[in-house]
Amino acid sequence: STPVATFCALLTAARMGVLIKGGDVLESLGEITAVAFDKTGTITRGEFSIAAFHVVADKVQITHLLYWVSSIESKSSHPMAAALVEYARSKSIQPKPENVAEFRVIPGEGVYGEIHGRHIYIGNKRAALARGSCHTVPEKKDGDLKGVSVGYVICDGDLVGAFSLSDDCRTGAAEAIQELTAMGIKSVMLTGDSAEAAAHAQEQLGGALEELHWDLFPEDKVRLVAALKARAGPTMMVGDGMNDAPALAMADVGVSMGVSGSAAAMETSHATLMSSDVLRVPEAVRLGRRARRTIA
Ligand code: ADP
Ligand code: MG
């Protein structure tokens, strides 16, 4: 493509809110035959609300539990963290991140923090089973909303809390995936969240996705993107999280979410959706296809 034509196409993309890092990326966009979407924060809004929060150990008080959890989660940028902090505040608990002695993100599980000498893990079922002495965990309670994600709190090896949270699909997500399908592009979901949360999103999308993959570690996302490239051709990965960065790098075109996404995802990606609007994905592919036709 001529430098001028490429420049114009990149400008058009930027006007519609897609920042593309160069003409070669634009051409790769036009070749895409498969798209792997992250769920949380990409297909869904990444704005969780807490449906329920329960203490599951006699010796622990809810106020203490919420104080530990919100103080530790104040240090996390995961979408679930903001919901937990907000929930504690709504119960008049002031998080004190300055009292958290140590903080770590555990990919595929959740977070770890030490507060007032207590060693606390907050995360999914895998975290509860790996970090707690429990062999089973309480699943959803009756009356919980359908499709919620369930999280657990482990304190010094004991399961002390359980909570459920929910998140909705972004406006336009179903339409974007339907458009991709109409363009002959296969769409799949890759998530670190549970089977139930994945199925709930798929239901909200009217079954638009061809495949769902859940309970994934960041390295599983990389492996699945590589596998998709091998069996379905040039592949785009769309994701927002720090945990998506390696998979974004593995994809032929990695696309990050601008407003809500992590810095790591933006750095490794080849393009960024400034408005976090997934409808821009099929539009960007169309622009890439047109740019390729101009060359030929
Ligand atoms: P994803 O965001 O794609 O679901 P992650 O690897 O970031 O993948 O997280 C995997 C799972 O670990 C999440 O679905 C969630 O259940 C749990 N998790 C991650 N971060 C946190 C956190 N800060 N607080 C509680 N749970 C978390
Ligand atoms: Mg995500």
Image (cartoon, rainbow, N blue to C red):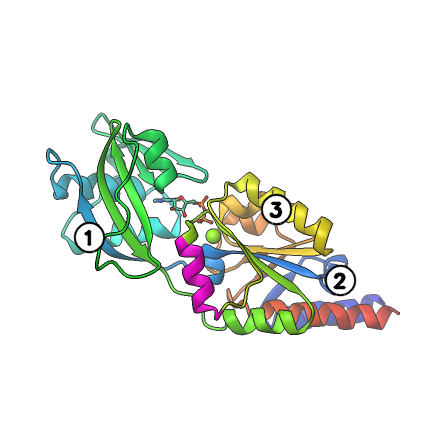
Residue span colored magenta: 196-206
Q: Which residue is mark 2?
A: 31
In this orientation, which residue lies closer to the viewer: 201 or 64? 201
Residue 45 shows up from this direction: no
Upstream in the sequence, badge 1 or badge 3? 1
Residue labelled 3 has its Cβ within 8 Å of some atom of ligand 1: no
Q: Nearer the viewer, mark 2 or mark 1?
A: 2
Determine if residue 75 is in view: yes
Q: Residue at x 11, y 39 (%)?
A: 61
- The mark nearer the N terminus, 3 or 2, is 2
Rate crowding at label 2 as few (under 14), some (14 to 19) or many (20 or more) other CA atoms within 10 Å.
some
Q: Are marks 1 and 3 in contact (CB under 8 Å)?
A: no
What is the CA distance from the residue labelled 3 to the residue labelled 2? 19 Å
Residue 281 is left or right of residue 86, and the answer is right
Magenta stretch, main secondary structure class? helix
| Residue shown at 29% from the left, 30% from the top | 132
Q: Given the image, on which type of amino acid does mark 1 rest?
A: Arg
Residue holding disc 1: 89
Q: Which residue does the numbered mark 3 point to in the structure image? A: 224
Tag 2: amino acid:
Glu
Crowding at mark 1 (Cα within 10 Å: few <14, some 14-19, many 20+):
some
Q: Quadrant of the C terminus?
A: bottom right
Query: Going by the image, does 214 lie left or right of 16?
Result: left
Q: Residue at x 71, y 71 (%)?
A: 287
Residue 86 at x, y = what percent?
25, 54
